[in-house]
Image (spheres, helix red, strand yellow):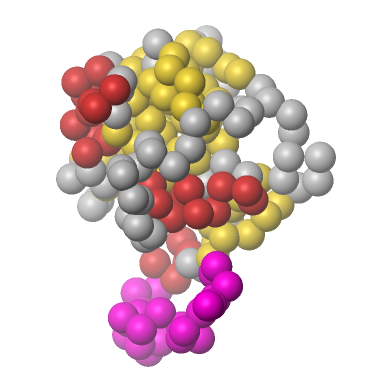
Amino acid sequence: MDEPGAQIHAEHPYATPAGQRDPLRRFRGRLATPVTLWTTGTGRDRAGLTVASTLVVDGDPARVVGMIDPDSDLAEAIEATGRFTVQLLGDRHRVLADRFGGLAPAPGGLFAQQDWTDTEWGPVLSAGTSWLGCRYDGAADVGWSLRIDAIVQQVTLADDEPILVYRRGRYLTVGTP
């Protein structure tokens, strides 16, 4: 049996050939971005998405800005609930990030493989992650994405751990506790 994460191809089999790749996408791919998990809802109405385009802005009030897929279940759910969480993922969350990003199977549904704690902003992983509770403050179409704006209402810090970042189509771990 293959080990988890074993590769069949050295490169993604459907990747655009190198000479045809968009230079802007190539530039963006060179930026290391934190991998976060955005969740909202309760019970069967939960929705979540792995988001690597998240910006936290200090101020009064503090804000979160994120770029998400406008066709995602999360986009509709955030608008319906008016609240969501932003969880910072670590190395131990690689498979979870792939599930919520639509890159790996999610037997039983996205929320079936982990333990969750419900908050007034949405579900958070029970296994101690740092997270924000956010109040939705509008959205706008930007390029091919939907920009979600929110006001930070809750900050919960867990033990510091190396974070998961995304760069050039791969996960990396950054930082030392």
Q: Based on the displayed image, in which of its 4 quarters is residue 142 positioned?
A: top left
Magenta segment includes 61: no
* Lateral position of residue 174 relative to residue 37, left or right: right
Judged from this view, the residue extending furthest toward the front is 1
- In the figure, 150 relative to 4: above or below? above
Residue 86 picture location, percent across and down: 47, 30
Is residue 102 visible in the rendered image? The answer is yes
Horizontally, residue 85 falls left or right of residue 80, namely: right
Residue 18 vertical placement versus 24 (above, below): below
**Residue found at x 48% / y 48%:** 96
On screen, 112 above or below 102?
A: above
Q: How far from the left and from the top, in percent, is residue 26?
A: 44, 71
Which residue occupies the foreground of this view, 135 or 107? 107
Q: Is residue 56 above or below residue 1?
A: above
The residue that appears at 34% across and 25% down in the rendered structure is: 40
Q: How many marks?
A: 0
Residue 161 in the figure: left or right of residue 150: right
At x 73%, y 39%, the residue is 161
Report the predominant secondary structure element of the magenta stretch. loop
Image point (27%, 17%), residue name:
82
Residue 17 colored magenta?
yes
Can the viewer see residue 138 in this picture? no
Which one is nearer the viewer's eye here, 52 or 156? 156
The quarter of the picture where the C terminus appears is top right
Residue 77, given in percent of the width and then of the height, sits at: 23, 28
- Rendering quarter of residue 167: bottom right
Residue span colored magenta: 1-24
* Residue 126 at x, y percent in the picture: 55, 27
